Image (tube, rainbow, N blue to C red):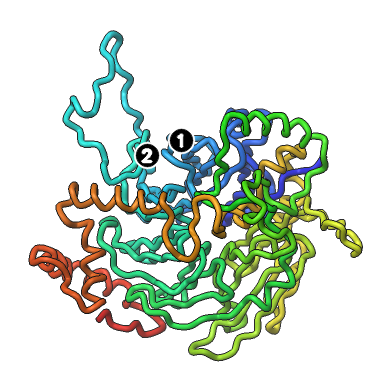
């Protein structure tokens, strides 16, 4: 029987945590021995994990003590790494797209509706209503509903900020004073934290979705971003200034082997079907169980028109992950692309000097990677993938994880270690063809690009849903904050040469100046590169 591939890997000096389908496993980082796993027959959360479905998002706090996961059941689960104990489970209003820990332990959740909510690490569920005393309505108790949120939050999450489009990434700046968010509509926003309604800057210049952002530890004033554009972009994120581009398309295109299915793209990537369509899907699942899993394509959806279908042989670029590391006295950027069989590394250089992109081809799609504390690259592979109608010899390598390091500027494979051996032979979770199909490793290839059909309009005009979201958020933000939500428009007006708003708006911006300078001082302190002053 086939097994789930590992989709995330976290490492500390003491532990390694592998995410495998719906399960999580904690291993000894040195010996590779399995300490705890939700896949174990005696683990109390085994059944619950399997019911929740595959883990879509996960994050580990800086201390390595807490793991947070989110699955298709829209539950935010917090685990103690020691013992892999489930500490809390909270219902989310929408499916999560990314998770991040704040320095104080709070959890940030970005979702498909474009909002970022903050949840405390320790969760205290509300007491149940007394018998015969129904739970009072919030309006009767005088509690104001969080009107800034685009949807109700059943677990009391606190809204930090909101976009008018699906969020793809949320990232805390190194000192924790800013939160950076990226969305499907080419936007990167830099907001204050925790005062998310105050927008510091925008990094504007992408023409397609942004799916990965990263701040290098050796250049904390700079941001790397990538998505559907044929280059990575470098920004001075505090000012929003574009620094340079790093072309990548020619280097990665030959290795993109997974193609999106012919389907209508639109909305937030979730299928829109009526009752009849759902019934047809239930019947189709029975047939799908009889077929061999082909992870070469993402889960198809019924097309609404022939003209809206995507050509199956047309590759789609989606940057999955960007990171950085230091080795052999040099600094490097590493990234992978959804559906590509190679991992890519390029030297970090100042200015617009030409950069040669090195790669290591695994002959299997790279799902994700992580950089360990000793600057080695741990690469997770989709070993269940098989090429379609290929004349090449079938790659029978079944190793889920492989490790690379840099030697004289070349990527080389490291010898096996006890941890690597355990990840490839002991941490295995059997999966049926239907379960592998539900994993949907390549859904971003279909859900992120826009199409002229469905909810998406031609060109760069916002969709009706996005306009509705933004109108709702702007109106309620103005009502609740008394103008704080307008600061974005006021600052943009000033940049265009128009008036920055009324006198009250100007006073608010001026009143925030001292706080802004204090935050900037933290970013500037200890940097290796000079930061452009905010104009």
Which quarter of the image is occupied by the N terminus? Answer: top right
Q: For mark 2, does the 10 Å Cα neighbourhood hold few (<14), some (14 to 19), or many (20 or more) residues?
A: few
Judging depth in this view, the residue of 242 and 67 nearest the camera is: 242
Residue 202 appears left or right of 198: right
Q: Position of residue 24 (x, y in %)?
A: 61, 42
Q: Looking at the image, which residue is at 53% across and 86% down? A: 349
Judging depth in this view, the residue of 521 and 15 nearest the camera is: 521
Q: Position of residue 165 (x, y in %)?
A: 42, 55
Quadrant assignment, res 319: bottom right
Which mark sits nearer the N-terminus, 1 or 2? Answer: 1
Where 219 falls versus 175 (above or below)? below
SS class of the residue under badge 2? loop
Where 340 falls versus 419 (above or below)? below
Q: Looking at the image, which residue is at 72% across and 45% down? A: 4
Where 192 falls versus 64 (above or below)? below
Residue identifier under label 1: 87
Q: Which mark is residue 122?
A: 2
Judging depth in this view, the residue of 94 and 22 nearest the camera is: 94
SS class of the residue under badge 1? strand
Q: CA distance from mark 1 to mark 2?
A: 8 Å
Which quarter of the image is occupied by the C terminus? Answer: bottom left
């Amino acid at each position: 029987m086939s097994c789930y591939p590992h989709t995330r890997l976290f490492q500390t000096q003491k532990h390694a945590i592998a995410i495998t389908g719906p399960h999580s496993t904690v291993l000894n980082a040195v010996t590779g021995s399995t300490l705890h796993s939700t896949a174990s027959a005696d683990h109390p959360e085994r059944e619950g994990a399997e019911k929740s479905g595959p883990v879509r998002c996960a994050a580990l706090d800086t201390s390595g003590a807490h793991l947070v996961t989110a699955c298709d059941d829209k539950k935010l689960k917090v685990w103690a790494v020691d013992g892999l104990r489930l500490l809390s489970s909270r219902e989310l209003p929408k499916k999560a797209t990314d998770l991040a820990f704040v320095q104080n332990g709070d959890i940030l959740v970005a979702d498909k509706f474009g909002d970022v909510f903050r949840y405390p690490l320790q969760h205290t569920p509300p007491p149940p209503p007394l018998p015969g005393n129904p739970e009072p309505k919030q309006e009767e108790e005088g509690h104001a509903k969080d009107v800034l949120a685009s949807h109700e939050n059943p677990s009391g999450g606190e809204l930090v900020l909101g976009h008018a489009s699906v969020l793809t990434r949320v990232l805390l700046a190194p000192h924790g004073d800013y939160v950076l968010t990226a969305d499907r509509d080419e936007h990167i926003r830099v907001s204050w934290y925790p005062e998310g309604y105050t927008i510091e800057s925008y990094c504007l210049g992408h023409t397609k979705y942004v799916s990965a952002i990263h701040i290098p530890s050796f250049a904390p004033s700079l941001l790397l971003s990538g998505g559907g554009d044929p280059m990575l972009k470098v920004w001075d994120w505090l000012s929003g200034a574009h620094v340079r581009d790093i072309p990548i398309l020619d280097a990665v295109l030959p290795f993109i082997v997974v193609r999106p299915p012919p389907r209508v793209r639109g909305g937030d990537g979730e299928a829109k079907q009526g009752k009849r369509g759902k019934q047809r899907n239930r019947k189709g699942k029975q047939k799908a169980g009889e077929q061999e899993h082909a992870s070469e394509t993402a889960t198809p959806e019924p097309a609404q028109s022939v003209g809206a279908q995507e050509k199956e042989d047309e590759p789609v670029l989606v940057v999955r992950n960007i990171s950085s590391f230091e080795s052999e006295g040099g600094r490097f950027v590493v990234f992978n692309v959804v559906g590509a069989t190679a991992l890519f590394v390029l030297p970090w250089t100042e200015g617009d000097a030409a950069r040669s992109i090195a790669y290591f081809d695994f002959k299997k799609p790279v799902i994700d990677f992580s950089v360990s504390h000793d600057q080695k690259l741990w690469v997770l592979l989709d070993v269940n993938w098989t090429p379609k109608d290929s004349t090449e010899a079938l790659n029978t390598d079944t190793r889920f994880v492989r490790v690379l390091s840099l030697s004289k500027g070349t990527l080389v494979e490291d010898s096996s270690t006890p941890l690597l051996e355990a990840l490839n032979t002991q941490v295995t979770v059997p999966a049926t063809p239907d379960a592998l199909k539900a994993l949907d490793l390549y859904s971003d290839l279909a859900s992120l690009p826009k199409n002229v059909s469905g909810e998406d309009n031609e060109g760069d005009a916002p969709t009706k849903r996005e306009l509705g979201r933004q109108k709702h958020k702007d109106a309620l933000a103005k009502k609740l904050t008394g103008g704080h939500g307008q600061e974005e428009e006021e600052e943009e007006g000033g940049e265009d040469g128009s008036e920055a708003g009324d006198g009250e708006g100007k006073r608010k911006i001026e009143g925030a100046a001292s706080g802004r300078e204090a935050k900037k001082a933290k970013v500037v302190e200890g940097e290796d590169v000079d930061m452009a002053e905010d104009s």
